[in-house]
């Protein structure tokens, strides 16, 4: 489902090359649940960004369902993310001026706009189209335990509630792959435990493939597989991907 071959990422720092990832290979089957672990600065977030096509590798390749991300244009990668990938950020990245429901509606509206060749708002698809978007947003919020909080703004929600909105938003377009960067990193232990259970449940019930970066030992232990990075290189759990 997701395959990375010999990924390398190098940045220039002070005019000198800084190697962040070194020859990382991995393969994740459909419905898999992979935790990427390692100390701060080991390359976890960089690896997630490459797997999502948010950035391109300096060497190597990433294929999602057989499509080489490097062969796509920036717009092509964005379309693929909209169709197949959900992303959960550590800092939630909710739009503060939108309610919880409106935040979850955004990716569905964007997908609808793309399908209708540039219309500026999914509401222009007709009342029926928007009612379906609103219904799914409410359904997802209920799924993550936020029924009755649909019209609250992010500032009116706790950190754990904001993260649950972010997870609901990530699932809005029924992605086949969910990528999450430290999804429990800014949460207290009890709230983090609830987010862990939610991710495990979504993986089990929806069959969504999950790849996440985490420092959380409890979360990593619930994954089906663990890949450990150190100084940008895989030290355990990687895949020697063959042709």
Image (spheres, helix red, strand yellow):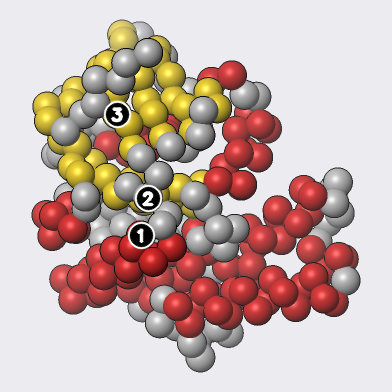
Using the numbered discs, state the Cα–Cα distance from disc 3 to disc 1 in whole angstroms: 19 Å
- Who comes first in sequence, dot 3 or dot 1? 3
Identify the image quadrant of the N terminus.
top left
In this view, 200 is above or below 41: below
Viewer-proximal residue among 169 and 13: 169
Say which mark, if any, is on residue 26. 3
Using the numbered discs, state the Cα–Cα distance from disc 2 to disc 1 in whole angstroms: 7 Å
Secondary structure beneath dot 1 equals: helix
Report the number of numbered marks: 3
The residue identified by callout 1 is 203
Using the numbered discs, state the Cα–Cα distance from disc 2 to disc 3 in whole angstroms: 15 Å
On the image, the x and y values in percent for residue 155 come to 46, 76
Which residue is pictured at 60% across the width and 39% down the height?
80
Which residue is pictured at 50% across the width and 58% down the height?
170
Identify the image quadrant of the C terminus.
top left
In the image: residue 183, left or right of residue 141: left
Viewer-nearest of labels 2 and 3? 2
């Amino acid at each position: 489902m997701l395959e990375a071959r010999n990924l390398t990422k190098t940045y220039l720092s002070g005019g000198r090359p800084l190697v962040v990832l070194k020859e990382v290979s991995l393969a994740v089957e459909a419905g898999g649940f992979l935790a990427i672990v390692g100390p701060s600065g080991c390359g976890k977030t960089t690896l997630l960004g490459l797997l999502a096509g948010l950035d391109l590798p300096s060497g190597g390749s990433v294929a999602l369902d057989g499509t080489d991300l490097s062969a796509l244009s920036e717009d092509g990668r964005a379309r693929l993310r909209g169709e197949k990938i959900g992303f959960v950020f550590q800092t939630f990245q909710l739009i503060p001026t939108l309610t919880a429901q409106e935040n979850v509606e955004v990716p569905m509206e964007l997908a609808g706009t793309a399908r209708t060749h540039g219309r500026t708002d999914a509401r222009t698809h007709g009342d029926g189209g928007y009612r379906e978007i609103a219904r799914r947003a409410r359904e997802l919020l209920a799924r993550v335990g936020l029924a009755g909080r649909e019209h609250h703004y992010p500032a009116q929600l706790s950190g754990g509630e904001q993260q649950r909105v972010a997870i609901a938003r990530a699932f809005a377009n029924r992605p086949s792959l969910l990528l999450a960067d430290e999804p429990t990193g800014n949460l207290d232990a009890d709230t983090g435990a609830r987010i862990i259970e939610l991710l495990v449940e979504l993986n089990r019930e929806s069959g969504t493939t999950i790849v996440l970066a985490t420092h959380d030992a409890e979360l990593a232990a619930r994954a089906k597989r663990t890949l450990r990075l150190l100084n940008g290189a895989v030290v355990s759990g990687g895949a020697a991907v063959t042709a």
